[in-house]
Image (tube, helix red, strand yellow):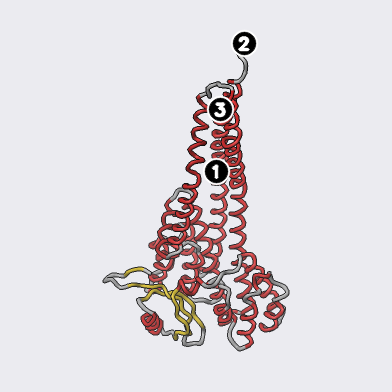
Amino acid sequence: MTSAAGGSTVTAYSFRAARIDGAIELGVLDAESHEAAATALSERGLFPMDIRVESESTSTRRGLPPRDLALGLRVLATLLESGLPMARALAALGDLVPESWEAALPSIVQAVREGRSLAAALVAAPIEFPPVVIGIVQAGEGGSGIALAVRRAAELTEQSAATRAAVIAALAYPCVLAIAGTASVALLVGVVLPRFGAILADLGQPLPPTTRFVLGLATVARASALPLFVLLAVTAIAFRAWRATPVGALRWHELLLTIPLIGSVRRSAATSRASAALAALLESGVPISTALLHGARASGDAALAARLLTARESVILGQGIARALSAANAMTPTAVRLVQAGEETGRLAAMLAHASTLEREQADRKLHAAVRLLEPAMILIFGGMVAIVAAALLQAIYSVRPSA
């Protein structure tokens, strides 16, 4: 919730509404109340079918893992392209998809058998499906072909899963290095040095200066470990709760975008996801205003999503897409130039798909460059820590050697 001018409270509502032509439109709008949201939809020429607070619509349902979602959509597209009717394709899906689909399939199959569309069945499923996937499926049911739409949704989800896997793979080695370095330093400081200190104390010899310094730090670390752990745990819980709010997510993502290198990677990655979603939606026949709404949610970045929604309002008022995106700073300059070229040539979807590929590759290059810088930095940090501990250990060893 946010406070609007005049003290009124504005809430984000997710809605499902029917257009005059019978198509179903899904989206999110800000309104002061449930009644105000219904009135706003009616003024757009829509017939509200379901309106709920955005946090309520997503808090009780969990989404599928990206890889599982992509595999299920790919299998469904293959079954539909082979000529199977929707009901039979969904019935056959149970033996072919990952187990994470089991909670959603029965309700989806039942809804389709009752005559509801696949998009409506996905919306009502006990598992949350990404809005961009539902939008593509809805567009396919409206005219571009449901099999083709499901395949496009599968390709988009596969791309998202591949990006996620690349990030995890790139960060795997630095994480292992951090864990190993921390464990090594903790072992030396917490076990080895204290034992040498006890041996020197038994021999009545004073501790070398470096050894005293390191042992003092170890004593302070052990004494403050539990309070520090509790403080970090409480801070982490409070931070996650704050970040889960719309305002918290927006401010946090805005902050991340200002951090050198991290912000550049996030901006390119979010632009890639939004561009891919927009391209798929436009190819499926979704209007640009609805495509921008789903593309904003597919970006994965609250700050850029807000900017895309701002650009969407400008587009609705008649401004050019590229100009609106540039004014709102909603995409990278490269993507904006490609969008402008697409507007001028009538190949907007193709240019957006190209922008998605370029920005994904750019994000990958920046991420790997960051990891390449992170690895030697971590080696130097932990190497320096181990060198200090080793110096303290060697001084402790040499202090017990008999003098000549």
Number of residues whose C-alpha sits closer than 10 Å to that of mark 1, classed few (under 14), some (14–19) or many (20 or more): some
Q: What's the distance in space between the residues labelled 3 and 1, CA to CA?
A: 27 Å
State the residue in front, 324 or 206.
Answer: 206
Q: Mark 2 points at which residue?
A: 404
Q: What's the distance in space between the residues labelled 1 and 2, CA to CA?
A: 47 Å
Residue at image location 45% in from the left, 73% down from the top = 54
Nearer to us: label 1 or label 2: 2
Residue 251: x percent and y percent?
A: 40, 59
| Quadrant where the N terminus is found in the figure | bottom left
Say whether disc 3 or disc 2 marks the residue closer to the N-terminus.
3
Nearer to us: label 3 or label 2: 2
Observer able to see residue 303: no
Residue 354: x percent and y percent?
A: 55, 62
Residue 324: x percent and y percent?
A: 40, 66
Residue type at mark 1? Leu
Residue type at mark 2? Ala
Residue at image location 49% in from the left, 29% down from the top = 213
Q: Which mark is residue 328?
A: none
Say whether disc 1 or disc 2 marks the residue closer to the N-terminus.
1
Residue 315: x percent and y percent?
A: 40, 71
Label 2 SS: loop
Q: Name the residue under label 3.
A: 392
Q: Is 398 located above or below residue 308 in the figure?
A: above
Label 3 SS: helix
Q: Residue 374 carries which label?
A: 1
Relative horizontal placement of residue 269, taking residue 99 as reference (left or right): left
